[in-house]
Image: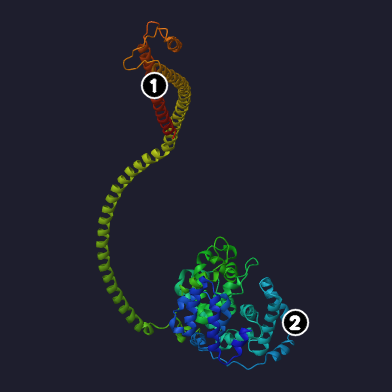
């Protein structure tokens, strides 16, 4: 697996940089910002301020490798520095064989197995069967390896986050680095020197930062040994309230802080936890005040960080942010001597008093500067008040404009609301008008059809008359031509209009024919008059025929125009 390559290779730094480059491609967008901070820290711890690390959680898929990198490389010096102020000798990391340790641990009493199971039963839902087996093996193997520490339940809680991230034997190796290189084992050896000094430093800081609360706890016979020792020895993981334990993500965040800040970071965490619970501690049941306060601080300290909805997301981040507000400056080694006399003679403090006078003088100078700044701020405040008055005046004008605009908006809204009715009314009016025009068009069309039919009938009658006139004209022409022939053959000229003795016997034949032809004329007409009469009738018939033709042409043009007008109106 990749972790095996990391722990076994001699070129760990080069491989780690390459592996990190591959893994950061898989990060979520919200994890990228936190990883950028940690990547700078891993490359050079001086490039990143510690507050950023406390507020940037390590991405879950990279946490195991970050821990290993910190413990295996020079960044472990931060742990050394934080421990060195307590002047406790460190023991070099022993050489060991994992298989041999496992074999030797089998000889330990079975009561240790029972005690381990009792302590992890509350986290059985968070641990797999393999992790429980690994955790038992780690605790028993360490008891064999470090005989000065032996078996202690606190090791269960220290190793628990490790087995959830790292398989055996690598989780055991990381625990060894933490216990020896960070000298955390000094809290568990005989007389517990490191724990005593940490508790003393914790008491000094607590009494300084929270004097009233510290005095209240002291009056209630609640001393740090009754609750804070559990915090430091288990790194705040041995807590349980109503069957609930701090979530594993919370423990991971605490480990992150301890790895970058050393055990001194646990001091800041403890002070932050005490301050966060100060309001609750003063309201604990007075009947069993001391025991109740100690039990609360041991088991329920983390409940104050829980949101109202009960979610545990970002719980560790909130704990670290609260603790960083109380980030502590490491005390000098002399100040943590638990056997030192706190009631020294006044002469010892004479130099300090002189320094205090100097500090007071500096504070007076600061007060003068602050008064000067206050005067400037007062002037600025007056200017702001003037600006505020002008702003109020402008606001009043804008309010009036807003009222007018609101009225205009209201009128426009009413107009818009009434517009559908107006549109509907106009639409109905146009529809009614169109319907009226359609009815008129239909009526006009009917009348036009009737007029056309009548005109057609008249045209047919006129055509019939024209045909009759043509026939009559042709008959008259025939008669006229026949008369001309008769007149020509009988010696009658149309110019002189004279007859050669029409009543003589020699002309009896011609006279008979003339009578037959002109038998319909009045008897008093002469031959010339009869001829002129026939010619006049033929002319009259021709004129009538011509008039009929003109009337037909006129009627056809009129009908065409009427049809065009009707079509235009219809369109």
Q: Which mark is residue 542?
A: 1
Which quarter of the rendering shows the N terminus? bottom right
Graded by Cα atoms within 10 Å as few (under 14), some (14 to 19) or many (20 or more), the crowding at tag 2 reads: few
Q: CA distance from mark 1 to mark 2?
A: 153 Å
Relative horizontal placement of residue 418, taking residue 162 as reference (left or right): left
Picture coordinates of residue 347 (x, y %)?
A: 37, 84
Q: Earlier in the sequence, mark 1 or mark 2?
A: 2
Above or below for 4 versus 414: below
Above or below for 377 versus 3: above
Graded by Cα atoms within 10 Å as few (under 14), some (14 to 19) or many (20 or more), the crowding at tag 1 reads: some
Q: Secondary structure at mark 1?
A: helix
Q: Secondary structure at mark 2?
A: helix
Q: Nearer the viewer, residue 538 or 94?
A: 538
Identify the residue under disc 2.
110
Q: Quadrant of residue 357?
A: bottom left
Picture coordinates of residue 261 (x, y %)?
A: 50, 81
Q: Quadrant of residue 497?
A: top left
Q: How is this picture coloured? A: rainbow
Picture coordinates of residue 392 (x, y %)?
A: 29, 51
């Amino acid at each position: 697996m990749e972790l095996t390559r990391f722990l076994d290779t001699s070129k760990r730094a080069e491989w780690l940089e390459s592996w990190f480059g591959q893994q950061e491609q898989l990060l979520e967008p919200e994890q990228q910002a936190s990883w950028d901070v940690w990547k700078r820290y891993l490359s050079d711890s001086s490039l990143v301020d510690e507050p950023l690390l406390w507020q940037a959680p390590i991405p879950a898929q990279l946490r195991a490798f970050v821990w290993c990198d910190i413990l295996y490389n020079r960044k472990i010096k931060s742990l050394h520095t934080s421990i060195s102020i307590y002047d406790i000798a460190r023991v070099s990391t022993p050489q060991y064989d994992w298989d041999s340790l496992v074999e030797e641990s089998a000889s330990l009493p079975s009561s240790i197995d029972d005690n381990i199971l009792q302590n992890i039963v509350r986290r059985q839902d968070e641990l797999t069967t393999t992790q429980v087996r690994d955790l038992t093996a780690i605790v028993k193997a360490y008891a064999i390896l470090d005989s000065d520490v032996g078996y202690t339940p606190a090791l269960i809680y220290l190793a628990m986050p490790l087995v959830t991230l790292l398989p055996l034997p690598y989780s055991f190796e990381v625990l060894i680095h933490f216990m020896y290189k960070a000298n955390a084992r000094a809290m568990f050896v005989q007389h517990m020197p490191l724990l005593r000094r940490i508790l003393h430093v914790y008491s000094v800081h607590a009494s300084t930062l929270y004097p009233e609360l510290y005095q209240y706890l002291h009056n209630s016979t609640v001393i740090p040994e009754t609750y804070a020792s559990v915090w430091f020895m288990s790194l705040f993981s041995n807590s349980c309230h109503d069957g609930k334990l701090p979530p594993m993500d919370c423990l991971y965040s605490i480990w992150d802080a301890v790895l970058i800040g050393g055990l001194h970071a646990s001091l800041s965490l403890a002070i932050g936890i005490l301050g966060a619970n100060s309001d609750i501690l003063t309201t604990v049941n007075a009947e069993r005040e001391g025991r109740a306060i100690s039990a609360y601080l041991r088991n329920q300290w983390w409940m104050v960080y829980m949101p109202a909805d009960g979610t545990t997301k970002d719980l560790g981040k909130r704990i670290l942010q609260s603790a960083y507000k109380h980030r502590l400056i490491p005390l000098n080694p002399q100040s943590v001597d638990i056997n030192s006399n706190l009631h020294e003679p006044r002469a010892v403090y004479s130099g300090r008093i002189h320094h205090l006078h100097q500090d007071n003088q500096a504070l007076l100078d600061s007060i003068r500067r602050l008064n000067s700044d206050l005067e400037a701020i007062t002037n600025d405040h007056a200017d702001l008040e003037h600006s505020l008055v002008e702003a109020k005046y402008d606001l009043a004008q804008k309010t009036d404009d807003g009222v007018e605009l609101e009225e205009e908006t209201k009128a426009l809204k009413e107009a818009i609301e009434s517009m559908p009715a107006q549109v509907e009314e106009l639409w109905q009016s146009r529809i009614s008008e169109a319907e009226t025009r359609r009815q008129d068009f239909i009526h006009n069309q009917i009348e036009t059809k009737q007029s056309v039919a009548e005109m057609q009938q008249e045209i047919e009658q006129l055509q019939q008359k024209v045909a009759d006139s043509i026939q009559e004209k042709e008959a008259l022409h025939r008669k006229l031509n026949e008369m001309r022939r008769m007149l020509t053959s009988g010696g009658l000229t149309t110019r002189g209009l004279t007859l050669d003795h029409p009543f003589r016997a020699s002309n009896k034949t011609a006279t008979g024919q003339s009578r037959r032809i002109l038998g319909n004329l009045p008897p008093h007409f002469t031959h010339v008059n009869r001829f002129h009469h026939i010619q006049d009738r033929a002319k009259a018939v021709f004129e009538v025929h011509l008039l009929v033709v003109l009337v037909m042409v006129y009627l056809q043009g009129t009908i065409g125009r009427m049809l065009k007008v009707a079509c235009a109106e219809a369109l």
